Image (cartoon, rainbow, N blue to C red):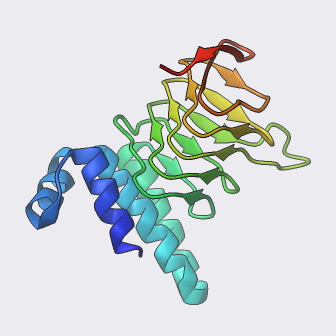
């Protein structure tokens, strides 16, 4: 497990750092706990067949405890912020950059199971509640995806998109 990444996750989710902050976050921040379980499931997955089984058990625990489906075969960067982790689904091939903020009921996954292609979410992106990003889509650095949007095309860096299907609304800021 990347210790620097865990401390960044802690700070982003709980606004604290250090051992005391870690202990407080375990009790008060379900977003941090969900990210920590994801990081653990990724780490143990490398231990061969036993690790894969443990990884699946930790992943299922994350779903049961926090309602957060973060596939251990997805890639999530440091500083992942989940203010409300319930209902978040991150499919197996999804790539998420650093310092991404994801709200409740967001789905990142494939649009066609016969040809599984997954989205890439670049660093600094905010995805608001209920959004769906499906297929081989790239959401550019620093973009914002509005609530209840359906993103099926690439989103340029630094832009706000909203609607179903999502359209560029304006630059961020």
Q: Nearer the viewer, residue 91 or 124?
A: 124
Q: Is residue 159 above or below residue 88?
A: above
Q: Nearer the viewer, residue 74 or 81?
A: 81
Q: Is residue 25 above or below residue 51?
A: above
Quadrant holding the N terminus: bottom left
Query: Residue shown at 33%/45% (left/top)?
Result: 31
Residue 137 at x, y = what percent?
76, 39
Count every numbered label the image shows and give the total.
0
Query: Residue shown at 35%/49% (left/top)?
Result: 65
**Which corner quadrant of the image does residue 150 belong to?**
top right
Residue 116 at x, y = what percent?
83, 50
15 horizontally vs 40: left or right: left
Query: Residue shown at 17%/60% (left/top)?
Result: 22
Query: Residue shown at 48%/35% (left/top)?
Result: 87
Q: Nearer the viewer, residue 160 or 73?
A: 160
Q: Is residue 109 above or below residue 61?
A: above
Residue 128 at x, y = what percent?
49, 25
103 horizontally vs 33: left or right: right
């Amino acid at each position: 497990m990347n210790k620097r990444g865990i401390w960044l996750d802690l700070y982003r989710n709980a606004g604290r750092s250090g051992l005391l902050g870690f202990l407080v976050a375990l009790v008060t921040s379900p977003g941090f706990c969900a990210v920590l379980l994801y990081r653990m499931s990724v780490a143990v997955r490398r231990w061969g067949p036993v690790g894969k089984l443990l990884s699946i058990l930790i992943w299922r625990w994350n779903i049961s405890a926090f309602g957060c489906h973060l596939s251990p075969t997805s890639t999530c960067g440091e500083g992942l912020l989940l203010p409300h982790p319930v209902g978040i689904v991150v499919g197996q091939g999804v790539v998420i950059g650093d310092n991404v903020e994801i709200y409740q009921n967001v789905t990142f996954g494939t649009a066609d199971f016969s040809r599984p292609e997954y989205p890439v979410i670049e660093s600094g992106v905010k995805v608001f509640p209920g959004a769906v990003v499906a297929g081989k889509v790239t959401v550019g650095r620093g973009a914002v995806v509005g609530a209840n949007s359906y993103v099926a095309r690439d989103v340029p860096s630094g832009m706000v998109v909203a609607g179903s299907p999502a359209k560029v609304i304006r630059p961020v800021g």
